[in-house]
Image (tube, rainbow, N blue to C red):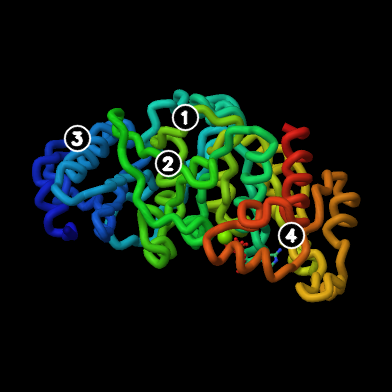
Amino acid sequence: MSVTQQQVLDALAKVSSPRGVALANAGVLSEISANDGKVFFSINVDATEARAWESVRAAAEAAVRAIPGVAVAMVALTAERKPGGASPPPPPPPPPPPHRHAHGVANVSAHRPPQGAPSPMSKQADIPGVGAVIAVASGKGGVGKSTTALNLALGLRDLGLRVGLLDADIYGPSVPRLTGIREKPQLNDDRKMIPIVRFGLAIMSIGFLVEEDTAMIWRGPMVMSAITQMLRDVAWGTLDVLVVDMPPGTGDAQLTLAQNVPLKGAVIVSTPQDLSLIDARRGLAMFTKVNVPVLGIIENMSYFQCPHCGARSDIFGHGGARHEAEHLAVPFLGEIPLHISIRTASDSGTPVVESEPDGPHAAIYRSIAAKVRDRL
Ligand SMILES: Nc1ncnc2c1ncn2[C@@H]1O[C@H](COP(=O)(O)OP(=O)(O)OP(=O)(O)O)[C@@H](O)[C@H]1O
Ligand SMILES: [Mg+2]
């Protein structure tokens, strides 16, 4: 049964803003995405009022979840300097409090430390039960970040660790495709989303909740709010490592994420081309800026390996990432060849570490995973 936007609006009629105005009339709602029983929207409010709105957000989410046919409801609270409506040019921003990101995202999380915390690190409250959160990032798109994140997660699993994977790439969530997961996460008794378990990994993707193309239009604060919810409103259980597939690039959304997610470290994926390495350097700089240790660089599509004869060709001038890592005094974690079986495995929903566990590629990912583990 499909749920319509009107049904959502009807359900929200019972929810009021802190000032007693019906939520639907308060001029704070984003577009409502209602697809396939998955409902997603945000409430955009002034940053100074965010606290008062949290109970409204929770009430809105509960009201939507109560609609018959709703499998997943996610209501994000986003705080901007200028709430709602078509935006006139924003006034000059007020000076941000020390270490607070200019877009000051408010959210939903009960674990959020008090405002005015002295350091960016202290905002990054741990996720209960999760040992270490690591980001897999790239300076630009299309370098194989998601493929690497998933196979790295499987490599860590093979080392005996309990591993989760969070696809935070709101611009192009590919984990549903890479894992073949089609089902929607269910809610537990605490109304937290239960991650889908596949290949022994606890997996959550923004792509389970919204369509890939919907995600493209999200704005920065909404992105952060959604990701914070994915981190904290998910029943991860007990994990040694949670691998986060970050959105590619080093823009505002990525920086905010790097700053707000309690990261123990970051892994940068690059290809050997010069251009990609420049981007990788930007990625490094971003994490350094927010005091997240870079655990190392992985060179993906490092060399071409012929699927027929196994011969190797360095079509991109291989080794760039290794040199760059040496130059920047960052650990080099390994080289992954460009190989057809990595691509076909990924794109058919069973990653290569799972489909060919005894093959050479799985061994490479496991060796990278061991280096990552040793650095945590
Ligand atoms: N080492 C590899 N050998 C062969 N194909 C690969 C390899 N790594 C990734 N690919 C393929 O390259 C394509 C892009 O990979 P992937 O989706 O992992 O990249 P990404 O960096 O996450 O991209 P995006 O920026 O769009 O999120 C996919 O088709 C994937 O199967
Ligand atoms: Mg990707």
Q: Which mark is residue 270?
A: 4
Q: Is residue 48 visible?
A: no
Amino acid on which the number 3 mark rests in the picture: Pro
Residue underneath mark 3 = 18
Residue underneath mark 2 = 195
Q: Nearer the viewer, mark 4 or mark 1?
A: 1
Q: Kindly check if marks 2 and 1 are in contact, taking CB atoms under 8 A apart as contact.
A: yes
Which is more toward the observer, 340 or 5? 340
Q: Residues within 10 Å of mark 2 (few under 14, many from 20)?
A: many
Up the image or down, 307 lies above or below 68; here it is: below
Give the percent coordinates (x, y) of residue 144: 65, 62
Tag 3 secondary structure: loop
* Left or right relative to 230: residue 261: right
Which is more toward the observer, 37 or 155? 155
Tag 2 secondary structure: loop
* Left or right relative to 258: residue 168: left
Amino acid on which the number 2 mark rests in the picture: Pro
Tag 1 secondary structure: loop
Q: Nearer the viewer, mark 3 or mark 1?
A: 1
Give the percent coordinates (x, y) of residue 291: 69, 36
* Left or right relative to 125: residue 216: left
